[in-house]
Amino acid sequence: MLTEENPTKTTHTVQQKLSEEDQQAILEIARKLNETQKYALVQISKIARICSMDFVRQTFEQTIEIETQGGLMVNNGKRRRTTGGVFFYLARGNMSDEQRRRIFPSQHQKQKARPFVWTRRLKGIQKIKRTGEIVDMRVKIMGYPGDVVRVNDAMMTQMQHLGGGATIPAGLPQMPQTQMTYTVYISRDQWKKVEKKLENPDRWLVVDGLLAPDPETDSFSVFATGVSANKAKKQTSDAQPEAQKTQPSAKTKSVPETEQPPALPAIQLDSPEAQQKLQDLHAAADKYRAKIAEIEELPEDQRFGLQMTQKLLAGIEAQIQTLTSDNA
């Protein structure tokens, strides 16, 4: 795995000889990258000779880590990179300019943003000595609302989002694949304008609002300043919740102010999608546990993000518990 002290950046310029063991390791790495063409093997061997075999191994480990988090999109955002494509993208980004010219002579003029390794954000945060000020914080969310309840003259619903699949500009870190819950608060008058339109399953609820964390419910609150019901984009229609497909109308329920909004529908684990979801949640939980252990090893005055990471882990563990207990 790439570390802060050894970010894979290397300046070797003299070609190194590869042992028979190194050559066998390259063949195994290429196989795991699904890169069995002669050209790919030659390129990986060239990287090992110019940048070192350790560079190849560490780039491969980072590739596998990124793949488990959802992979990387190509620059135009139309598809995911292949596993081998991620490897070569990372390798190019972590080389010196001279190494890049020697290994990819036909591509040296096309400079690409170097990949942002997520763990490096901690060192970056430590270097920030002066914190700025936010004068306004707004967010736009789009999707299908869950059950809508009324508390006095306010309407409430919950919507969930699984990060990790968004197209991110080159050079920025990929979003962690973490499922977050957003509780949306909409005025009664605003809701009346979109309620009937949302009975059409081809319509999204679009909310512009102010964002604030809600630690008591392990979610974020969105206070709507404007709502609309827009036509859903075709390429994301598959993301529509199953409950929304079968019951397109978001029914409004009047409940006492002290009553909690109803929980979102349980996911049945007898489907491949649900099993994959549970697997992803376990993987995310393991990463948060490892990150907590990493932060706790730092001096107390440098443990940035510890509480938030613990909170995110608790949220993931709660989701796992809900999935497994509802389907026991």
Image (cartoon, rainbow, N blue to C red):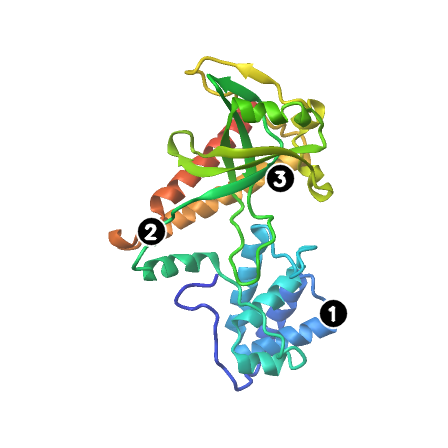
Q: Badge 2 local density, few (<14 within 10 Å), some, or many (20+)?
A: some
Q: Is residue 236 left or right of residue 66?
A: right
Q: Residue at x 60, y 48 (%)?
A: 165
Q: Residue 90's x, y, as percent? A: 57, 66
- Residue type indicated by callout 3: Gln
User: Which residue is depicted at the point 49% across and 13% down?
Assistant: 255
Residue 328 in view, yes or no: no
Query: Decide: marks 2, 3 in contact (CB < 8 A)?
Result: no
Residue 169 picture location, percent across and down? 57, 59
Q: Which residue does the image show at 60% across and 82% down from the upper left? A: 101
Give the residue pinned by disc 1: 37
Viewer-proximal residue among 15 and 171: 171
- Which amino acid is tagged 2? Phe
Relative to 202, does residue 70 appear above or below in the rendering? below
- Residue 125 at least partly seen: yes
Question: Cα distance, mark 1 to mark 2?
Answer: 45 Å
Residue 247 percent coordinates (x, y): 68, 22
- Mark 2 falls on what kind of element? loop
Q: Is residue 312 above or below residue 190?
A: below
> Given the image, on which type of amino acid does mark 1 rest?
Gln
* Front label number (2 vs 3): 2
Question: Which callout, 2 or 3, points at the residue further toward the start of the chain?
Answer: 3
Decide which of 188, 234 is in the foreground and name it. 188
* Residue at image mark 3: 276
Taking the image as shown, residue 140 lies to the left or right of residue 73, namely left
Disc 1 or 2, which lies upstream in sequence? 1
Q: Nearer the viewer, residue 159 or 102?
A: 159
Left or right of 303, for residue 5:
right
Instruction: Quickly name the residue at label 2.
Output: 304
What kind of element bears circle 1? Answer: loop
Q: CA distance from mark 2 to mark 3?
A: 31 Å
